[in-house]
Image (cartoon, rainbow, N blue to C red):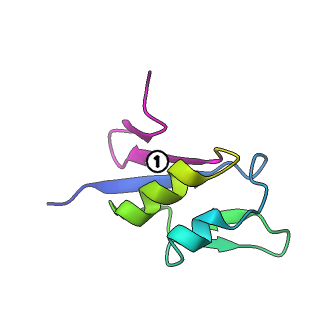
Amino acid sequence: MADRWHVEVDRSLCVGSGQCLHHAPAHFRLDSARRSHPTDPDTDAAEPVLTAAETCPAEAISITLRGSGEPVFPPEE
């Protein structure tokens, strides 16, 4: 069974750059205030979602393993 992720966007950090939409358009949307949110917070693990988190200029996207809460991104130091 594939991993499931829980994706969150800290809307207080989001600057509306649209990088998440560029890398994972099926997984993110911008609202009328140009703040990002996941289309479905609980999703199958997918490389485009990870890339969106890694390239977010505001570091507003976090990903955890659904169920355990173990960090996927940003990784624990």
Would you say residue 64 is visible in this rendering?
A: yes
Quadrant in the picture for the N terminus: bottom left
The magenta stretch spans which residues? 60-77
* Image quarter of residue 71: top left
The residue tagged 1 is 63
Q: Is residue 74 magenta?
A: yes
Amino acid found under the numbered disc labelled 1: Ile
Observer-nearest of 70 and 47: 47
- Which residue of the protein is positioned furthest toward the top in this rendering? 77
The percent coordinates of residue 57 (x first, y second) are: 68, 49
Measuring 43% from the left and 26% from the top, which residue is drawn there?
76
Above or below, comparing residue 60 to residue 34 in the picture:
above
Residue 46, compared with residue 70, is above or below; it is: below
Q: Quadrant of residue 37?
A: bottom right
Query: Residue 58: horizontal and vertical position, in percent?
Result: 70, 46
**Residue 50 in the image, given as x and y percentages of width and height:** 43, 55
Q: Is residue 45 left or right of residue 29?
A: left
- Residue at 36% from the left image edge and 61% from the top image edge: 47
Instruction: Determine crowd level at label 1: few under 14, some 14-19, many 20+ residues with C-alpha closer than 10 A.
Output: many
For numbered disc 1, what is the local secondary structure? strand
Please state if 41 lies on the left or on the right of 34 as rendered: left
Residue 38 appearing in the image: no
**Residue 62 placement (x, y as % from top left):** 53, 46
Q: Residue at the location (76% across, 73% down)?
A: 31
Q: Nearer the viewer, residue 76 or 4?
A: 76
**Residue placed furthest toward the right:** 33
Residue 70 inside the magenta-drawn segment? yes
Q: Quadrant of the C terminus?
A: top left
Count of numbered circles on the image: 1
